Image: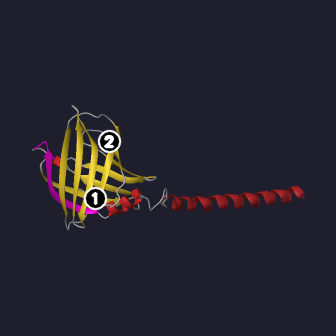
Amino acid sequence: MFVAKLGRSYRYSLTWLVFLAAAQSLCLPAHAQVPLRVGDTTSNAAMSFRVLKTLEGTWKGQVTTDPANPDINGPIKVTMHVASRGNVILHEIAPGGMLEPTLIYLDSNRLTMIHYCEAGNRPRLVAGTSPEQKRIEFDFADVSGSREPVYLNHFIFNLIDADNHTEDWTFTLADGSHLHAHFQLKRTKDAASPN
């Protein structure tokens, strides 16, 4: 009789254990969708990230290079999306029809950028301190892939007002010289969409 009760009790406990495990597993996907709150949201990097999110939308303008490069100079379209529940900014350009995305995100208390270059590399840049949040400057940290023929080593967002900003891209060429590309951009009324 005691063994029979233990068997029934064991089955009852096992049933509840299976039920609780199943119920908990249903909750895990919901927890996985909650963004991690790493670092201080009042840090300079977090404030800069919030400012960059205001650039979401479509921008059009002109590119000028130094030294002059007629293959790059001319009209440009930039599209910026805030994605992944606000955890990443997707910056897209398509020079010559070749889509080049750049991801901007917080990595603890560092504002980080990874540019997926048509040269086949992925330079990672990290923003410095931006006291006024009008000029957000990224410096080269490292690169995945080859540094040749070119890689992005410096990037600056200059926020002029809600509808105007500039971007300054500095590339290092294989011979060690630099190519600077200046984007003068104005917000368009187009919906944010890929180039």
Residue 50 among those drawn in magenta: no
Q: How many residues crowd around disc 1 within 10 Å: few (fewer than 14), some, or many (20 or more)?
A: many
Chief secondary structure of the magenta portion: strand
Residue 60 in view: yes
Residue 45 lies in quadrant: bottom left
Instruction: Return the residue nearer the eye: 10 or 160.
Output: 160
Q: Secondary structure at mark 2?
A: strand
Q: Residue at x 21, y 50 (%)?
A: 94
Work out how far the residue at label 1 is from the one at label 2, CA to CA, in angstroms. 19 Å
- Residue 93 versus residue 124: which sits nearer the camera? 124
Circle 1 is placed at which residue position? 80
Residue 122 is tagged as 2
How many numbered circles does the render carry? 2
Circle 1: residue type: Met
Name the spot of residue 18 as percent of width and height, x first.
Answer: 67, 58
**Bounds of the magenta segment:** 55-69
Give the vertical position of 115 relative to 85 (above or below).
above
Residue 56: within the magenta? yes
Horizontal and vertical percent position of residue 146:
30, 34
Instruction: Pick whichever of labels 1 and 2 is earlier in the sequence.
Output: 1
Residue in the foreground of this view, choosing between 126 and 188: 126
